[in-house]
Amino acid sequence: MATDLHYTAPGLSDADAQRVVELLQGRLHACNDLHLTLKHVHWNVVGPHFIAVHEMIDPQVEAVRGFADDLAERIATLGGSPKGTPGSIVGEREWDDYSIGRASTQEHLAALDVVYTGVITSYRANLKELDDLDLVTQDMFIAQTEQLELFHWFVRAHLEDKGGRLATDGATSEKGAAASV
């Protein structure tokens, strides 16, 4: 994904800015996909704990939408052009579309456990690389990771038994996680 940068932030080399924009764009796609996935869950969750999960999801949607806006604005600050179209998300993402439709709260939460694990893992991988590239962007990623980990904990709290074991332990796919609950 090459982007022509005509300028960047003072003190940041063109090559470093290019790589930072690529990392930011990857997270922008992830956050756009995540907030749409969360809204999908909000609309499709059913069962005895419907209202609790339905209402838990909306603040996550709003926060992740805010993350996307911050990421896009950082791309522009560095001289890049953020891509937020559905086609760019689908064409450039490295994950499959969310696979659960109308389902129980537990099934959706189990699938979201896998989704959040993937998003947080990729953020953490980017943090290491940003340590040598751009501490300002790294700080943004750290703050977003902290919030994503909190949201993940909210989801996992519904999947734990009293001993702290997750019903989704070992699941690697959304459908596999959903089937485990």
Image: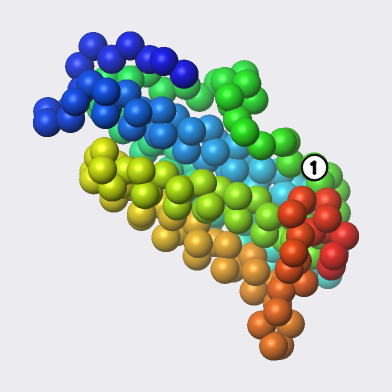
Q: Is residue 51 visible?
A: no
Coloration mode: rainbow
The spot of residue 62 in percent (x, y) is 51, 48
Query: Is 86 placed left or right of 10 in the picture?
Result: right
Q: Residue at x 41, y 15 (%)?
A: 2
Front one among 12 and 181: 12
Kind of residue at disc 1: Ser
- Which residue in the rendered view is the most extreme toward the bottom? 163
Task: Give how far across and how far down residue 138 sits, in percent.
Answer: 31, 47
Q: Nearer the viewer, residue 129 or 115?
A: 129
Vertical relation: 31 (above or below) 84 = below
Quarter of the image with the C terminus is: bottom right
Residue found at x 56% / y 48% = 119
Element carrying mark 1: loop
Residue at (72, 36) in percent of width and height: 96
The foreground one among 127 and 79 is 127
Give residue 86's quadrant in the image.
Answer: top right
Instruction: Quickly name the residue at label 1.
Output: 99
Q: Is residue 139 among the parts visible in the rendering?
A: yes
Location of residue 11 by image quarter: top left
* Residue neighbourhood size for the residue with mark 1, other residues' Cα within 10 Å, grouped as few (<14), some (14–19), many (≥20): few
Q: Is residue 110 left or right of residue 88?
A: right
Question: Residue 48, percent across and down?
Answer: 83, 70
- Residue sticking out furthest to the left: 11
Q: Position of residue 112 (x, y in %)?
A: 68, 55
